[in-house]
Image (cartoon, rainbow, N blue to C red):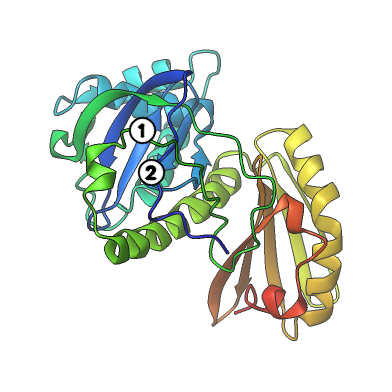
């Protein structure tokens, strides 16, 4: 497991616009890349793909911080090519709040009854031309809580002030807290927003559901996750719901058991054949 809490994101010639946001977790910052539909943790390589609609929704709110954006305008902006109901908007806002650690206080994305939503300008730090999220390292390690790749720092490069000013231990705690939110947010987004793109089956005590933003992503997750699924089926000693999703660099697992809550695990794609049973057990409540 590689902790990138002491390494700023590497500069790149391919700088893209980014907005720096505070989250509901103390001293945790995220970079939002509207053109990439992604969030990235400050000081780390952990990323979440918001998808087109989720990213467009956040982008529209950030265009006018502190101003109410009507539900109708948000629907038109985020789902321009689709006809969706108010429920889709509610679910997408819910997922964004989960990702930003704002699901309880609701101070970042605020609801104005019968009017719409606004984003609290106090949580928007600034805009900057930041490097696009870099490619994952060749051999990221499998982690019990998240996959965090260590970026390669460039000598003499200038790190974002906000990320550079945080003490190492505090940033490390922030990294793990936010990484959990991002991983669960990825799974929630797939589970809540694209319930038509899933496939499930039962092996012993384990019922597995593969999630994806589209059919191709779901099929890839299923192809990569079948061996892990079979091993977890042998390890599970009580009925367990397993949700499997993926991004470019990792397979994300969420295990739920009645009365025991849930645990999650992220496994780097390069490490799928090397994960031990003891590591897999960490996913079981």
9 or 94, which is in the foreground? 9
State which quarter of the image contains the C terminus. bottom right
Task: Indicate left or right for 43 with 140 as reference.
Answer: left
Give the residue drawn at x 28%, y 36%.
160
Q: Is residue 69 above or below residue 157?
A: above
Q: Is residue 176 above or below residue 166?
A: below
Please indicate, yes or no, whether residue 85 appears anywhere in the rendered image: no
Q: CA distance from mark 2 to mark 1?
A: 9 Å
Task: Indicate left or right for 174 with 196 as reference.
Answer: left
Q: Is residue 111 above or below residue 15?
A: below
Q: Which mark is residue 69?
A: none
The picture places residue 101, in percent across and down from the top left corner, at 33, 53
Which residue is situated farthest in the top direction here? 81
Give the residue drawn at x 20%, y 34%.
124
- Circles 2 and 1 in contact, beta carbons < 8 Å: yes
Local crowd at mark 2 within 10 Å, few (<14), some, or many (≥20)?
many
Task: Give the residue pinned by disc 2.
Answer: 8
* Residue 171 image-quadrant placement: bottom left
Please indicate, yes or no, whether residue 219 appears anywhere in the rendered image: yes
């Amino acid at each position: 497991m590689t902790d990138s809490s002491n390494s700023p994101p590497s500069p790149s010639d391919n700088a893209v616009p980014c907005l720096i946001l505070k989250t509901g977790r103390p001293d945790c910052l995220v970079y939002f890349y509207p053109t990439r539909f992604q969030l990235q943790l400050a000081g780390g390589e952990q990323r979440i793909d918001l998808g087109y609609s989720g990213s467009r929704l956040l982008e529209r709110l950030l265009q006018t911080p502190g101003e109410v954006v009507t539900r109708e305008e948000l629907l038109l902006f985020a789902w321009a090519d689709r006809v969706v109901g108010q429920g889709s908007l509610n679910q997408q806002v819910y997922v964004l709040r989960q990702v930003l650690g704002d699901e309880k206080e609701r101070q970042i994305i605020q609801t104005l009854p019968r009017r719409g939503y606004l984003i609290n300008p106090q949580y928007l730090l600034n805009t900057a031309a930041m490097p696009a999220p870099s490619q994952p390292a060749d051999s990221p390690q499998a982690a019990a809580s998240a996959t965090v790749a260590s970026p390669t720092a460039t000598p003499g490069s200038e790190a974002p002030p906000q990320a550079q000013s945080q003490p190492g231990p505090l940033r490390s705690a922030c990294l793990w807290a936010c990484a959990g939110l991002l991983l669960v947010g990825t799974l929630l987004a797939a589970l809540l927003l694209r319930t038509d793109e899933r496939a499930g089956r039962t092996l012993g005590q384990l019922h597995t559901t593969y999630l994806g933003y589209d059919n191709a992503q779901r099929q890839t997750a299923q192809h990569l996750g079948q061996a892990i699924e079979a091993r977890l089926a042998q390890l599970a000693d009580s009925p367990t719901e397993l949700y499997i999703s993926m991004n470019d660099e990792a397979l994300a697992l969420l295990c739920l058991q009645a009365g025991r809550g849930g645990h999650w695990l992220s496994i780097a794609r390069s490490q799928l054949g090397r994960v031990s049973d003891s590591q897999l057990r960490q996913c079981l409540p």
